[in-house]
C-alpha cells in the first residue's frame, strides 16, 4: 500500500485567488493512501521544498503529489527535492491547478472542485507508479547549425571558439543570408557588409568550422546527444576544391539574361555565377535551369575558359551522413509575397518596390552602383512614399496578424539615407503606429522626423494608381487631420511583412520540433528557456523563432551557442526512463509501432516461445532500444494488440486517472 503525501501550493495569489487551497488539501486528505495533505504559499521555494523533504522522512512517504503549476515549470525541481529526501524521483506527480484551473476559471467553487478532481487523478496514478532508474547515453562532441545567415554564423563562431566542431548547412551557394543584401544597418547606419564580411571570413578560416554551402538537411534521426543527420550537397557543376573564384567563367558565359536572385530580379546575371564579390565560399555555381550545356549539350564555354579545370557537367547530388550532439536551427526569414495586395499596384508598376528591393537599389554593389534610380526609366525620384505594415497586423486570410517588428526602424533608416544623399527628394511615410522597442531606437526615429524632415503621416494608403506620365498617384487618409490625401509619387516603397523561410516547416517535421500557427519555431518556455526547442537537443537562433532585428538576432545566437556548449561539454547525458516497453506475449509482429516511431527506437527480433505439447515456436516481436526511445508514446497508440506500453505512463495508470476524474 502506498503512503502518499499531497502538497498544495498557493503560488502567491496565482492559484489562491481562484482556488480555495485549504479546501483542496482537506478534501484530498481523505483519498485512499494519503497520509498527509497540506498547503503552503510557495511550495517551490526553499522553505516549501524543505517541508516536502521533512514530510517524506517523517511519514515514510512512498509517493508524493504536488498540486501547483505546470510540470514544464517545476517538475524537475520537485523530482530533485524527492531524490534529496531518499524518494525515487519518478514517484512524484504534478497536478496542474494553475494553468489548467486558476488561470482559466473565475468561479471559486467550480475552480476548487476541479482542482480537487485533478489532485484525485494524480493520487490514483501514484498508486500505480513504480520506481524508475534513468540510464546514460554518450554525447557526440559536434554541433550542426542549419542556416548560414548572421544568426547561424554567430552561433557557429561562438561554439567553435569554445573548442567544439561545428558544421554549417546553408541552402544558398554562399553563407551570409539576408544581411548580405543590406546597405546600412540601424540604429548606427554603419555598413552591413563591413560588419558581416569579417565574420563570414572567420567562419571559412576557423579550424573548427566546416561549411556545407548549396546544401540541405534531408533526414534527421536519433536524439539529444546522438543525432544522425543526412546532408544533401546539391550539384553546382563546379568542383569546389579546384575552383579559385577568379570569375572568368562568369564573364565569358554567353547566357546573360538570367534574373539575378541576389538583386531580387532587378537586373540579370549569367548562367554561371558567384552571388556577390565577398561570397564565402567564393566558388562559382552553374544554374541548371538556364545553362545551355546542361539543357542541350551544346556550349561548354565556361569549361573551355576555366584554367583550373573546375567545371564538371557530370556532377551529381551527393549525400553526407554525420553525427551531432546538438542542432541549432537558424533558417531565417523572407518577405511575404505581395500577390494579394493589388491595391498597391506592385505587379502593375516597376516603381512600386519592397523595402528589400530598395536596399539593393541603394547598395553600392547593387544594380545601379549605389545611385537611387527608378526601376522603370532609370531617373532620379523626387517624391517617395513609404507604406508601412503591408501584410503585417492584418487579417490572417490576407497577411500576418503579428507585427513584423523591424519595419518601422528600417523605414526610418531608408528615409534618413535618402534625405541625406538626395536633399531634393520629399519622403512621406504612412504608418499605423511607430514601434521603436530597442536601445536608441526612438531617438533614431525622432532624428528622421526632426533632423531630416521626413513627413510621417498617421494613416492608411487605400490605393496606388499608375499614371500615363509614369508617376504614381497615392490615395491615402490622414487620421490626425481627418483629410483624404492624393500624393504624386515617383517611387512607392512597401514595408512587406516577414515570415519564416519556407524550409522551416519540413525541417520542423524532421526534427520533431514544435511550431506555432505562423510557422515560427516554438521555444520551450518564452521566459525561462527562450532559445531551446521543446525537443531536447534542438536550439533556436534568430528569426526562425520570431521577427528580430540584427542586434537581437546576434544576442539570441550567443545564447543558443551557450546552451549548445553546455550540452557538448558533458560526456554523458541522463536518459529519460519513461520509455516504451513491449509485452512480447501480446506482440503480433505487425510493425505498426516501428513505422510511427520518429526516433527509430523500435526493431523486430525473432524469439523462441514454448508452444503446445512443449514445442518451440519462433515469433517476431518488437524490441525497444531504451537509449534511443524518447518516450513520446506514439507506438502505444498505434499498437493494435495493446502490446506496447510506456513506463511511467502505462495504460493502467492513464485509465486510473480517468476513473478518478469520473468518480
Image (cartoon, helix red, strand yellow):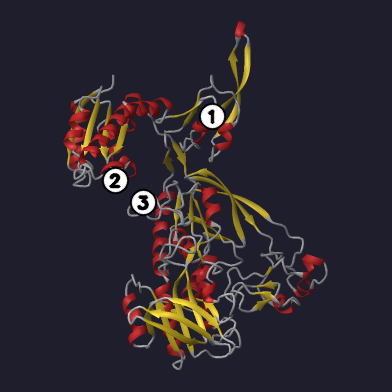
Nearest to viewer (mark 3 / mark 1): 1
Q: Tell me the quadrant of the picture where the C terminus can be found.
A: top left
Nearest to viewer (mark 2 / mark 3): 2
Task: Label 1: state its secondary structure.
Answer: loop
- For disc 2, the neighbor class at 10 Å (few under 14, some 14 to 19, many from 20) is few
Q: In the rendered image, which residue does mark 1 sit on? A: 639
Q: In the rendered image, which residue does mark 3 sit on? A: 525
Nearest to viewer (mark 1 / mark 2): 2
Q: Earlier in the sequence, mark 2 or mark 3?
A: 2
Where residue 71 appears, as percent x and y from the top left, is 33, 41
- For disc 1, the neighbor class at 10 Å (few under 14, some 14 to 19, many from 20) is many
Question: Relative to 260, does residue 645 appear above or below in the rendering?
Answer: above
Drawn side of residue 15 relative to residue 168, left or right = left
Quarter-of-image position of residue 5: top left
Drawn side of residue 82 relative to residue 246, left or right = left
Drawn side of residue 480 relative to residue 291, left or right = left
The residue at the point 48 percent across, 31 percent down is 580
Between marks 3 and 1, how big is the CA–CA gap? 32 Å
Q: In the rendered image, which residue does mark 2 sit on? A: 104
Where residue 298 appears, as percent x and y from the top left, is 83, 70
Where residue 127 appears, as percent x and y from the top left, is 32, 24
Between marks 2 and 3, how big is the CA–CA gap? 19 Å
Amino acid at each position: 500500500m502506498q503512503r502518499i503525501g499531497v502538497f498544495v501550493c498557493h503560488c502567491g495569489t496565482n492559484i489562491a485567488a481562484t482556488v480555495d487551497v485549504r479546501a483542496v488539501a482537506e478534501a484530498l486528505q481523505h483519498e485512499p493512501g494519503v497520509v498527509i495533505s497540506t498547503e503552503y504559499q510557495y511550495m517551490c521555494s526553499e522553505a516549501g521544498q524543505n517541508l516536502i523533504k521533512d514530510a517524506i522522512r517523517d511519514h515514510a512517504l512512498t509517493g508524493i503529489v504536488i498540486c501547483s503549476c505546470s510540470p514544464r515549470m517545476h517538475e524537475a525541481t520537485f523530482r530533485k527535492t524527492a531524490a534529496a529526501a531518499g524518494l525515487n524521483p519518478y514517484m512524484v506527480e504534478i497536478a496542474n491547478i494553475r494553468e489548467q484551473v486558476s488561470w482559466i476559471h473565475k468561479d471559486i467553487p467550480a475552480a476548487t472542485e476541479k482542482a480537487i478532481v485533478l489532485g484525485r487523478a494524480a493520487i490514483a496514478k501514484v498508486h500505480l507508479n513504480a520506481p524508475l532508474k534513468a540510464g546514460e547515453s554518450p554525447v557526440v562532441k559536434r554541433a550542426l547549425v542549419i542556416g548560414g545567415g548572421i544568426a547561424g554564423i554567430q552561433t557557429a563562431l561562438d561554439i567553435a571558439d569554445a573548442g567544439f566542431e561545428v558544421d554549417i548547412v546553408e541552402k544558398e551557394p554562399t553563407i551570409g543570408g539576408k544581411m548580405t543584401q543590406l546597405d546600412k544597418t540601424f540604429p548606427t547606419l554603419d555598413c552591413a557588409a563591413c560588419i558581416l564580411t569579417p565574420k563570414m571570413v572567420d567562419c571559412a578560416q576557423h579550424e573548427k568550422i566546416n561549411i556545407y554551402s548549396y546544401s540541405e538537411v534531408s533526414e534527421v534521426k536519433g536524439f539529444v546527444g546522438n543525432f544522425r543527420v543526412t546532408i544533401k550537397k546539391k550539384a553546382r557543376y563546379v568542383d569546389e576544391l579546384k575552383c579559385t573564384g577568379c570569375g572568368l567563367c562568369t564573364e565569358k558565359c554567353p547566357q546573360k539574361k538570367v534574373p539575378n536572385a541576389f538583386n531580387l530580379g532587378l537586373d540579370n546575371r549569367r548562367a554561371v555565377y558567384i552571388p556577390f564579390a565577398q561570397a564565402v565560399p567564393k566558388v562559382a555555381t552553374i544554374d541548371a535551369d538556364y545553362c545551355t550545356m546542361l539543357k542541350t549539350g551544346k556550349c561548354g564555354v565556361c569549361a573551355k575558359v576555366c584554367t583550373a579545370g573546375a567545371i564538371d557537367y557530370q556532377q551529381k547530388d551527393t549525400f553526407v551522413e554525420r553525427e551531432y550532439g546538438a542542432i541549432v536551427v537558424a533558417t531565417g526569414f523572407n518577405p511575404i509575397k505581395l500577390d494579394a495586395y493589388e491595391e498597391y499596384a506592385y505587379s502593375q508598376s516597376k516603381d512600386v518596390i519592397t523595402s528589400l528591393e530598395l536596399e539593393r537599389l541603394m547598395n553600392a554593389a547593387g544594380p545601379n552602383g549605389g545611385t537611387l534610380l527608378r526601376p522603370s526609366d532609370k531617373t532620379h525620384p523626387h517624391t517617395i512614399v513609404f507604406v508601412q505594415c503591408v501584410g503585417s497586423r492584418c487579417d490572417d486570410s490576407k497577411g500576418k496578424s503579428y507585427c513584423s517588428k523591424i519595419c518601422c526602424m528600417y523605414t526610418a533608416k531608408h528615409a534618413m539615407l535618402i534625405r541625406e544623399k538626395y536633399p531634393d527628394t520629399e519622403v512621406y511615410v504612412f504608418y499605423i503606429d511607430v514601434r521603436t522597442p530597442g536601445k536608441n531606437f526612438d531617438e533614431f526615429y525622432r532624428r528622421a522626423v526632426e533632423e531630416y524632415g521626413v513627413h510621417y503621416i498617421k494613416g492608411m494608403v487605400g490605393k496606388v494608381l499608375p499614371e500615363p506620365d509614369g508617376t504614381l498617384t497615392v490615395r491615402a487618409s490622414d487620421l490626425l487631420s481627418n483629410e483624404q490625401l492624393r500624393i504624386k509619387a515617383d517611387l512607392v516603397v512597401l514595408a512587406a511583412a516577414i515570415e519564416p523561410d519556407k524550409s522551416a516547416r519540413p525541417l520542423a517535421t524532421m526534427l520533431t520540433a514544435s511550431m506555432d500557427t505562423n510557422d515560427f519555431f516554438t521555444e520551450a518556455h518564452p521566459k525561462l528557456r527562450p532559445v531551446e526547442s521543446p525537443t531536447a537537443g534542438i536550439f533556436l537562433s534568430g528569426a526562425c523563432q520570431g521577427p528580430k532585428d540584427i542586434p537581437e538576432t546576434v544576442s539570441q545566437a550567443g545564447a543558443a551557442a551557450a546552451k549548445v556548449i553546455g550540452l557538448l561539454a558533458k560526456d554523458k547525458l541522463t536518459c529519460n526512463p519513461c520509455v516504451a516497453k513491449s509485452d512480447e506475449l501480446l506482440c503480433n509482429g505487425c510493425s505498426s509501432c516501428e513505422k510511427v516511431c520518429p526516433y527509430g527506437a523500435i526493431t523486430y527480433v525473432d524469439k523462441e516461445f514454448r508452444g503446445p505439447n512443449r514445442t518451440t515456436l519462433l515469433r517476431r516481436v518488437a524490441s525497444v532500444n531504451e537509449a534511443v526511445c524518447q518516450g513520446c508514446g506514439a507506438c502505444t497508440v498505434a499498437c493494435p494488440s495493446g502490446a506496447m506500453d510506456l513506463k511511467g505512463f502505462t495504460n493502467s495508470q492513464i485509465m486510473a486517472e480517468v476513473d478518478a476524474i469520473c468518480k
